[in-house]
Image (cartoon, rainbow, N blue to C red):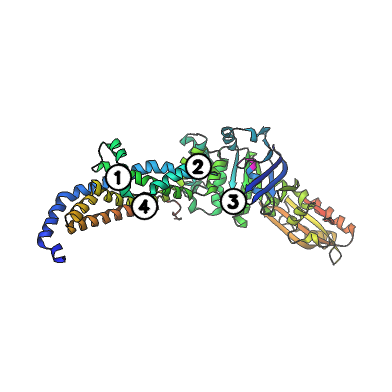
Amino acid sequence: MLNDLFSPETLSEAWRIIQAEFLTAVWETVYVTLLATAFSIIIGLPLGVLLVAGEKNGVLPLPSWLLQTLNILINLLRSVPFLILMILVFPLTRFVVGTVVGTTASIVPLVIAAFPFVARLAESSLREVSPNTVEMAQSMGASPLQIIVKVMIPESIPSLISNATIAITTILGYSAMSGIIGGGGLGKIAINYGYYRYKYLIMLAAVVLLILLVQIFQSVGTRLAARLDKRLKRKG
Amino acid sequence: MIEIRNISKTFHTADGSVEALKNVSISIPDGDIFGIIGMSGAGKSTLVRCINLLERPTEGSIEINGVDLCKLSEGELRKVRREITMIFQGFNLLMQRNCLKNVCFPLELAGKSRAEAKKRALELLDIVGLKDKAKAYPAQLSGGQQQRVAIARALATDPKVLLCDEATSALDPTTTNSILELIRSINEKLGITVIIITHQMSVVESVCRHVAILDDGTVAEQGAVAEVFSHPKSPAARRLVFPEGISDSPVVSEAGERLIRVVFNGAAAAGSPLIARMAVEKGIEANIAYASTKSIGGKAYGSMLLGIPGGSETVRAAIDYMTQTPDVLAEEVTPHAE
């Protein structure tokens, strides 16, 4: 079996496929991941803000039914397995993109799966801001919107970036799964060659590239978060 | 003029309701340094938060220069809060902004332009002696420096009132004195009314002109600092003035001494041996039973309890001698009924 896997024929065949398809696949994966993360943050961050600011003792208390609905909706979306969610949102995907297959179409289910997760991550970051700091802003006459924009978000930037890194690596994993329903990228290659055609070497190569991408996103995110955190700067 | 009229504050919790303040009335003249002192849990923090309505009192009214704050809309209240700023025990600086940007913060809230805010912030950092730290982040500063930045920030919007909520409680004694000195000079130079919340007697003694003693949500006693501290009437006041419980022991000690309380309220007596001079000039050998004094800017603040041997004439002579010095008050400590 191992002999088969690394025989000269399989190796040269694999190399041919890698040269022909991998560049596009990596690009598709990165494109889908970054766009899906961006949309998830655009929807998820404001929801995270509402979850914290909208509490009874928050800076912008919301009616409790609204806050509860929001919480239930987020939990609901988070409990549907991604594979099933992808199929469930077909109508939406068709409405937004015009088709349910292809790389761009896979962004829709990814955003639907990731924004509730991003909302929870943002919520936990924003909760790290001390209530004393918020009280200080209130004592200086800050409006709820000013507290959110000038205090809560800027003060939790390092934590928000760490959590955005978690989101991006998770979405990268989901994007690979979307290969099953016709999404593009490394996931599609791994499934098409590895699962349907028993070309394990190609699958292995795709997985190695996915691992590399996760490593790159993670270390860039960690470094960015540390560099932006002014609490870590010492004298000198 | 700040008029706190009959305010009460009740908190409703799962375990029932807690009355944090009960019918508190205090009036604070413009330009004063007013201390509110009490033990932990006496309701000090709630009271100071009622002054700028971070906490809404359940009953009563807060009037500042004739305006009843409780009747203002949220928008109007936010404008008023620029004139009643606050400093805190934990400094509460924005950790992700440098000092300059921290001082700019209230100016940004008030809608000032970037250039205008920066110019004003630099002036204020100069006033608190930290102009060279403008680009430093709070994490790079000591506690005292952080509180100076917080003071500069609190002054940015030209407030009429500065609330200090345990502002020196996290600082060491030397730093505490330098911060109090800064607060005093701000009060003198800018005429800002200062309200100091503290549990430390020494803070009230060294800077405040008037004091209210808060005990279990009520005002136990209020008046001029020297008066309240030289003859405390309420049990709460006596607990603060005599932390070792001297008031509970007989006023005439076993050695046949009678006690007098000497209050130094900014007397130019630091370094001059007042008690030794009394012994030499009047032949009265005072026994120091208790002393808590400090020199701030060459002036003495604090109080002493002296045991005076002999009869009431000697006591009178000692009191006369002490009170000849300006800003020194002396009073015989008389027995109190509990």
Identify the mark at residue A54; answer none if there is no mark. 2
- CA–CA distance between discs 4 and 2? 25 Å
Q: Position of residue B49 (x, y in %)?
A: 62, 44
On whether disc 3 and disc 4 are found on a single subunit, the reply is no
Observer-nearest of A221 and A4: A4
In primary-sequence order, the first of circles 1 and 2 is 2
The subunit carrying tag 3 is B
Which residue has dot 1 on it?
A87
Amino acid type indicated by mark 2: Gly
Q: Position of residue A131 (x, y in %)?
A: 53, 48
Identify the mark at residue A166; answer none if there is no mark. 4
Q: Which of marks 4 and 1 is in front?
A: 1
Helix, strand or loop at mark 3 = loop
Q: Do the residues labelled 3 and 1 touch (CB within 8 Å)?
A: no
In primary-sequence order, the first of circles 4 and 1 is 1
Which residue has dot 3 on it?
B89
Question: Was residue B42 drawn as part of the magenta stretch in this picture?
Answer: no
Q: Which residue is drawn at 69% across and 45% down?
A: B34
The range drawn in magenta is B50-57
**Viewed as shown, does residue A172 lie left or right of A131?**
left
**Viewed as shown, does residue B289 lie left or right of A175?**
right
**Viewed as shown, does residue A28 lie left or right of B64?**
left
Q: Which of marks 3 and 1 is in front?
A: 1
- CA–CA distance between discs 3 and 4? 35 Å
On whether disc 4 and disc 2 are found on a single subunit, the reply is yes
Amino acid type indicated by mark 1: Ile
- CA–CA distance between discs 4 and 1? 25 Å
- CA–CA distance between discs 3 and 1? 55 Å
